[in-house]
Structures are given as C-alpha cells and as structure tokens.
Image (tube, rainbow, N blue to C red):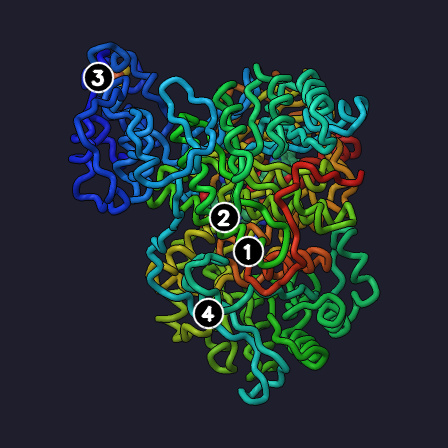
Amino acid sequence: MRVKSPLEVYRFLPQINCAECGETTCMAFAARLIDRSKKLEDCPPLLKDEFKSKYLELARLLAPEIREIVIGTGEHAKKVGGDDVLYRHQLTFFNPPLLAYDVEDTLDDKALVERVKKIHDFKKFYVGRFLKLNGVAVRAISGDRTKFAAAVKKVAETTPLPIILCSLDPAILRAGVEAVKDRKPLIYAANETNWKEVAALALEFNLPVVLFSENLDTLKSLAVSFAEMGIKEIVLDPGTYPAGKKLRESFQRFLNLRRAGIKEGQKDVALPLMAVPMTAWFVENDPVNASYWETVLASVFIVRYADIMILHSLEPYALLPELHLRDTIYTDPRTPVKVNPGVFEVGAPTKDSPVIVTTNFALTYYTVESDLSSNKVNCYLAAVDTDGIGVEAAVAGGQLTAAKIKDTFSKAGFDFKEKTSHSTLIIPGLAARLQGDAEDATGLKVKVGPPDSGRIPGWLEKNWPPK
Amino acid sequence: MAAKKIKLSELGEMFKGLDVEALEGVKIEGDIEIDLGGAGLSPQVAQALGHETTQIAAHLINIARILGYPADKVLGIGGAPGIPAQAGRPVLRELIPAKFQANRFEDWKSQIQEVTIGATSADGGTRKSTVTLGGERALPFYPDAPMPHRPHITMDVFDMPIGMAKAVKSHYEDIINSPAEWAKKVVRDFGADMVTIHLISTDPNIKNTSARDAAKTVEDVLQAVDVPIVIGGSGNPEKDPEVLEAAAKAAAGERCLLASASLNLDYARIAKAANEFNHVVLSWTQLEINAQKELNRKLMKQCNVKRENIVMDPTTAALGYGLDYAYTNMERIRLAGLTGDQELSFPMSSGTTNAWGAREAWMTSSPIKEDSDWGAREYRGPIWEIVTGLTLALAGNDLFMMMHPGAVAVLREITQTLFGSIESEAIDISGWTARGIKP
Ligand code: B12
Ligand code: SF4
C-alpha cells in the first residue's frame, strides 16, 4: 500500500459524508481503507463516472504490496498473496496460505478418490468455525498425458477445491489444463527450459502460473519476462530444499524475496511465494519422520512468507499443527476475538438442565460451546463480558468476578426461579476461587466444574442433578 | 476512452535521469508513436520507470521489437523462434535478463546482549562446558549478519514425581524419583545442552519442602552433570525468593540461571542472590512487552544486575492457545532490541513444555464429534511441542525449556539447520513433480 494515513486517502474521496459506505464520514471511511477493513467499492459515489480518475488513482495507491491472485472458482476459490507488512503486529497478514496436498496420477481411481475425499473432508473445530485444508496438487508421476488428464478430471469431479497441476513437461500440463480449464487451476511450473510453452499455455487459457528457479536472478528474469508477455497472475517458487545448508539458503531466499517486495517495493518480485515442504519425503524414509519433518518445514514457511504450499502427509498429527499454526500467524492481532455476552441455549434446555458460566473470549466460548453441543449436553451457557479474555487470565485480571456473573444473568433477564428447578450455577474449574463470592452475590448454589470443558460431560454424569 | 499515445522520444525523456547505460548503442530514430491503450501510462511502462537499468533497456527493446524496429540486430540478440504473440503483446525469444538484489535494508541498530550460563573451573565454577546466548545483530537465521550462537535446549527435571502426558512419562518412569539420575539421563541420552531443575515440591500447596531440601537437590544435580543448569522455583511467589536464595548459595559461582524474577514476587531478593553468588537472572513477565521493559529496568537500575546477567522469559503459550500472542510478543521484543531499545535487548527463554497443556497434545481423541479423527495422541504431543518451540525460535527465542526427547531432537535439528551447522547429502528438488512417494 502506497499510502499511510487516512488524510492522504481522504483527498481522493467524494467528501460529501453521505454515509452510504456505513461510516459516518468520508474520513472514517478513509481510515477503514487504510486498515483494509473496507473496500473502495463500498463507496457508491466514488464509482460514478465523474470520480473515475480518482477511483483509479486510489485503487493504485491502495493496492497491496504483494500482488493478490485467485486460484480456483466459486466459493472454494482462494485468494493468495496480498500482504502489506513483514510482521503481523504492523497490521495483520492477509489470505492465509493455501495448503494443497498432493495426489499422484498413478493412483487407481478408488485410491485417488479416497485420498481426495480425505483432503476435502478433513476438519478441526476452532473458535467457532472449522479449520480446513484447501487444495489438491495433482502430480504427473506417470509421464503420460492421457493418464494425467484422466487423474485431473477425476480430482475435479471429486472436489470443488482449487487444483494445482504439477509437471515440468508442457505437453502433460496442457493435457491437464484442457481437462479442467474452467476451474482456474494453478499451473506448476515454468522454468528456464520450458517457459515459452508454459507461458503460451497460461496466456491461452488465462491461468495463474508458478515460476520456479532456485537462482533468484533467473527467477526474476522469468517474472519480468512473464509480466512483459502480459501474464499477471504469477507465483514464485524459489525452491524448498528439505535439509542442510540448502534448506537454510531456501529460507533466506524467501526472506529476501519478501523483503524486496514489501520493504523495497520491487514490484517484479512482489508476488505470492510457494513452498514445497513435501520435499521432506525425499530425505526421510520412515513415514512418521517424514511427516514430522514435513510439518517442521511447513511451519518455517508459514511463519516466514509462503502463500501457497504443497504437502503430502495426511496424518492428523501433521495436519492439526499445520492448520493451527496457519491460523495463529494469520489471525488479526488488532481485534480481540470475542463473542457477544449473554445467556445462550445449547441444544434444548429444560428446567432441569445445568446452567454453565464461561467468558466471552471467542476461543474459550466456542471451545466450551462445542464441547457441550457435540456431546449433546442440553444446557444454558452464560458468556460473561470479560472484554474477550479467557477464564484464567480474566480471573487474574479482574474481568471475571462474582458481580459480573450476576450482571450477565440480570441483563439477559434470566430468572433462575422461572427457568430452572435447581437454582444452581456451574463455574469453570479455573475460576474456583470465585465460588464463595458468587454464592453471596447471586444467592444461588455454585458448583465448581473441571478445569477443562472437554471434561464437563463426564463430570455431569457424576455431579448432575445436584444433590 | 481515447487511447493515450506517447512518442518514443518522450519515453527517452521519461527515462532521462535514470542511469540507462544498457541503452547505449541503441539509437531510436524517427518519432514512432506507441499505442499504450487505456488510460494513462500502461502499468508496464509505469513500472519500468521504477526499474533498474537492464530491465528498462529490455523493455525498450521489446517495445522497439513490437514496432518492428531492428533492436535484435542492433544488439546482436539471436533469432530463436518465440511463442505466438498475444494480441498487442511482445514475442519473447529470450528471457529478459534480470539481476535480483535484496539490499540489507532493515534498520538493525544494536546487538542483543551476550549472556553466558555456567562457569568452568577457570571462572570459579565446576562446569565442563558453558552456554552462551544472544549476540544477534538481526532476526534469527537472517542472512544480514552472522548469528554468533545457536539456539540451545535445556531439559526439565522435577524434584518429585509429577503428572505428565503419557507420551512424556514413558521416558522418565525409571528415574522419576531421583532428580540427579533424571538430570544424567537427559544429558547422556537426550543430548540436553543444559538441565532445568524445578523445585516444585517446595510449594506450600504441594509438599512444602524446605529451602534447605531444595539446596540439597541443587547440589545433587550439579554433582550429577557437568553442563550449566537452570534453577526453577515452584512458581509460588511467597516461597520462591527464599528457595531461590538458598539454591543460589548452594550453587555459588556456577553461573546458574535463576528462574525467575517476576513483578509479582520480591524480585529484588532474587536479583541480590544472583549478584552475590554469581548467577544469571531470568526476568519473567506474562505476555506484556511493557511489563518486560519495566522488570528489566528495575533489575538493572534498582537491583544493579549487570546486563550480561539477564535473560528474559516473556511467556510461552501453546499452539492454538495463545501462541499468536506469545509469538508476536517475542517478535516485537526482539525487533525492539535490535533497533535500539536497550531495555529489551536480552536473550530470550521459552517454557516450551507449556505446549503439553494444549488438549490436542494429550487428549485421547477430540471431544468434538464433528472433528475429523485426531489420530494417535503419542504422535500429536511431540509435534505440538516442536511447532510451538520452532515458531518462537523464528521470533527470536534463544533458549528452550523442553520435555519430550523426540521433540528435543527435532527442534535441535531444525534450528541448527537454519543456523547453518548441519550438512546434508546433495539432493535434486527440481524433479519433485514427477517423483513418487511410496505409500
Ligand atoms: C493467552 C494468555 C493471555 C492473553 C489473553 C488473551 C485472551 N483474550 O484471553 C493476554 C496476553 C492478554 C494475557 C494477559 C494476562 N494474563 Co495471561 N495467559 C494466557 C495463556 C498463555 C493462555 C490462556 C488461554 O487462552 N487459554 C485457552 C482458553 C480456551 O482457556 P480458558 O479460557 O481457561 O478455557 C478453558 C477452561 O477454563 C475451561 N472452561 C472454560 N469455561 C468453562 C466453564 C465451565 C463450567 C468449566 C467446567 C470449564 C470451563 O475449558 C476451556 C478449554 O480448555 C495462559 C497460560 C497458559 N498457557 O494457559 C496465561 C495466564 C492465564 N495468564 C495469566 C496472567 C497472570 C495474565 C495477566 C494478569 C498478566 C499480567 N500481569 O498482565 C494478564 C491479565 C490480562 C487481563 N485479564 O486483562 C496467568 C494466570 C495465573 C493465575 N492462575 O492466576 C496464566 C495462567 C499464565 C501464568 N502461568 O502465569 N494472557
Ligand atoms: S459512501 Fe463515500 S462519499 Fe459517502 S461517506 Fe462514505 S466515503 Fe464518503
């Protein structure tokens, strides 16, 4: 982004404070553009003809440093790239890396479909949503065009996820492209030898393409040449070595490319980057070691600047940390993630159902809520307004108190006499020290649950209904 | 909208002032108009304005080519068949040459303090080896400046049996009742650089063992191993000062790391014990950069702890349970240290073992029915510890307090690889697209 302050942006806005954008003033809207929580298109007056030149100029000024490109179509289409900063605290990172898992074109139909479904279906609940994998990379092991095309076609039939076509043989790539051209696959890859044919393919079908070279002069030369030919959707793969000094050099190439792109504004290389942690499988023979090492490589490049990755292991012990780390690095550090406070129903509570207290930190709330609902516990769940702080920190910091608990129920109009037969509250194990105070403040019976909400169902079996 | 036309002579005018040496020898004669289509300057040309020499030249040559100007002949570029031209797009016969250069553009101003833990007989201790942390002049593993010391690992030893995840416990069952044997095992079998003895039995809510007992345990551990050690209290703010004082005295001259001084206990007592018996202080705060500054300042100004005797623990939260806070907190602290903040330019330590608190590390299966199968938990725990540690290693952490031997081995391998001390056989990655993996 070329502009830093709302004032610079304001100059280009209509300045009529009509509030159609949902902000009260154009200046407020300018601030939203700077923090990237609103888009130019949210200001209808700006889209009128008279403002065209200002609109275009602003679009240029606001464009992210790293080009944003799209792979795939429909609701599963994924944007990659689009970052403006080197460190997440400086703003936030945008567009979490696309994690694609490989499929070999030599698999028989059954095995292929099974693997693709596994990729498509894997999910892990976290903070109110599911963490998921988001791409399939088809690799041309067979060396056979027809076989590759058939495998690609089968993959496309099995999943709507974005597809990456992997081969260095342009004829094979072409066969793959023809099989799924309407799905906007990503082509992997053009290199020093095949670039003319691959460029022709990308141009003919208007597809995004990866350029590969571990020599950064060559990589830049490819990027400049492809840009010159009119190809805009470009991803750079500077090579991911799985071990030794070469891995260190790979890491440093990612750093230098991204720093050149963001800090120096070197537009030719300000492009999304691809890492290939699956090269781990070429140095580790044992599948557990290989999965571990692949996850390690993935972690390094999630933290330092990869926008797309190709991986192999579908072991849950590899996928869970990969998905969580991606989420860790890409959550917006500016907003404490919280839910609205209040008293909510989980399942279909009756007068005999438990009433459970937790905080409004999203991680806490959703963890508790899903532990309860997925175990079919019917109950009332109260989210106390702790400013989005978890149980233990909120007890330590004074945001979770007996008075706050009482407040939550009275604000929600929750009358224990009318709604329950037991006048009992359950508080988190980590908030045990509030028990006495809470009894005094609310006049209710207060029971202390287990420290981890995953244990509530088991705990209820022994402790509910209250004696 | 009318297509904007510019003349080649104007192009020359636009590039004036840039150092376009590579254009020498190309003389553009006549005034040919180039159709740039659309409004304003085409992005290519606009971009080219900001480019380096070779590229501007290449660009001009291409423009010249489109116009039929015999640039190839002038420059002696070969006439290999190119790809079919797109409408209005140049035919490229050769790649446009380019040089990539990333400048050393970050504003690293100051060096992280070097801190040595452990003392050999030459320095009044009895350790065979010492560990030096810090000294960085850039973020870890960056090419900008050599990183003088690799990250190190200290393994946890407890002064009484404690609850542990099953995957961890299986490695320690044989020695769980003897801190000395436990310490020997982690050094001998698991290659720990250092040992952390946690004196948790001193907690009044646990066993309330005395400070004298604790001092004895520390002596036993110092006898058992010859690597530097970390001395950890129980975390009880009332009891820790007394326990750490006694332990510091028992380990006089050994330059142990005393864990920890924090704002919620009498840090001055711990600082004083460190000064008096030649130890290093671990300055521990809870995920708050300003609190970290404040405590470091107090240790230096109020308690006269020397810079070379401070290591920081800004708190480690597990992957999925606040690692985002821990990561960014550490990265900000390290960036501040490297860019001149003298109150934050100390090496950092992480309680990486905290990763085992994440339910993904220890629960048999997901409590959430809709989740995909979590698989065997014995493989989930160690990788949780590894990824938590590795993420912080990239943020700038220098010392890792860890538990699982497998996690220790992998974290060591990756941090030393990025550090540059691990060789590997030559492998060819370029053909990964076509290389099968055995199922
Ligand atoms: C992330 C974190 C922070 C973040 C908080 C982010 C946030 N939005 O909450 C920040 C950086 C802001 C923070 C600040 C502080 N923190 Co803090 N923080 C942590 C950390 C690392 C993780 C906490 C977490 O997110 N856990 C995950 C969530 C999901 O857990 P949870 O809310 O407890 O919910 C679980 C259970 O409680 C239970 N549960 C929840 N509801 C219910 C309901 C029922 C009925 C039942 C039965 C169970 C149940 O199940 C849930 C899932 O397991 C912990 C250390 C650690 N590794 O645990 C320290 C920790 C909680 N923090 C601590 C402290 C002291 C603080 C500060 C006071 C530090 C300071 N001096 O400034 C401040 C207070 C800030 C405030 N209150 O305003 C201490 C608390 C010590 C104590 N026991 O008193 C801890 C334990 C660190 C430590 N070892 O010292 N912290
Ligand atoms: S919609 Fe546009 S013109 Fe209206 S207030 Fe928002 S920014 Fe200003």
Q: Is mark 3 within 8 Å of ligand 2?
A: yes
Can you identify the residue that label 1 sits on? Answer: A248
Q: B405 above or below A173?
A: below
For residue B275, above or below residue A216: below
Question: Could you classify mark 2 by the number of other residues whose Cα lies within 10 Å: few (under 14), some (14-19), or many (20 or more)?
Answer: some
Mark 2 to mark 4: distance in Å?
42 Å
Residue A419 visible in the current orientation = yes
Q: Is residue A361 above or below residue B19?
A: above
The residue that mark 3 highlights is: A17
Whichever of callouts 1 and 2 sits on the residue coming sooner in the sequence is 2
Q: Residue B310 carries which label?
A: 4
- Chain for disc number 4: B
What kind of residue is marked 2? Asn
- Marked residue chain, label 2: A
Q: What residue would you read off at disc 2?
A: A215
Label 3 residue SS: loop
